[in-house]
Image (spheres, grey):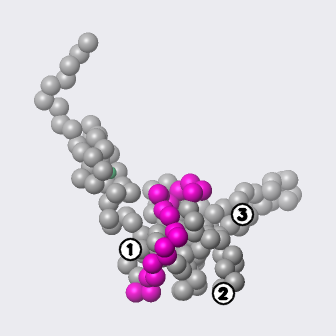
């Protein structure tokens, strides 16, 4: 067994995750879900809706495409994408998918607290955020 002594350990200031390389730690902090800067105001807002659309369908290649989930603000009539899209480099890989969409903002003058919304993170299927068109008043 080898024991390394006097090594530098880089620790995320927000969640405590540990890294051996500073660059990885800095990158992590810039996307860390515990970093308040990375929590969009939309995440508890009553104006937020989820969307789903089929993209990339190519009938000549018998490719049905795939289902793409997204976010939409009914107050501003604006499609949005989460910070995760930047972390996963979706913008660079598929710029067409995100054109006309904006990054979910950290601050918003029209924010309205939604009691029933639950957000663990911006991924997964466990949120209570309704799909666009599910509410009768839209
Ligand atoms: Zn962290």
Check mark 3 vs ligand 1: CB closer than 8 Å? yes or no: no
Q: Distance between the residues labelled 1 and 3?
A: 28 Å
The answer to whether residue 31 is above or below residue 138 is above
Q: Is residue 127 visible?
A: yes
Apparent side of residue 49 relative to residue 83 in the rendered image (left or right): right
Residue 123 point in image, percent of width and height = 53, 56
Magenta residues, start to end: 109-126
Q: Residues within 10 Å of mark 1 (few under 14, many from 20)?
A: few
Give the label, 1 or 3, closer to the camera: 1
The residue identified by callout 1 is 106
Give the vertical position of 135 relative to 56 (above or below).
Answer: below
Gap between marks 2 and 3, in whole Å? 28 Å
Quadrant for residue 30, please give it. Answer: bottom left
Q: Which of marks 1 and 2 is nearer the N terminus?
A: 1
Of the residues tagged 2 and 3, which is closer to the observer?
2
Q: Does the magenta stretch include residue 117?
A: yes
């Amino acid at each position: 067994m080898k024991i390394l002594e006097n090594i530098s350990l880089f620790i995320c200031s927000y969640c405590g995750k540990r890294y051996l390389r500073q660059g990885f730690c800095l990158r992590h902090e810039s996307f860390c879900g515990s970093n308040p800067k990375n929590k969009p105001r939309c995440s508890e807002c009553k104006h937020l809706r989820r969307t789903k659309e089929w993209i990339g369908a190519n009938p000549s290649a018998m490719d049905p495409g795939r289902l793409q989930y997204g976010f939409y603000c009914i107050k501003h009539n604006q499609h949005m994408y989460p910070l995760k899209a930047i972390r996963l480099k979706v913008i660079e890989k598929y710029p067409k998918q995100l054109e006309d969409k904006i990054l979910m903002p950290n601050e918003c003058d029209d924010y309205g607290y939604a009691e029933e919304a639950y957000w663990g993170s911006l991924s997964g299927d466990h949120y209570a955020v309704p799909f666009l068109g599910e509410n009768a008043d839209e």
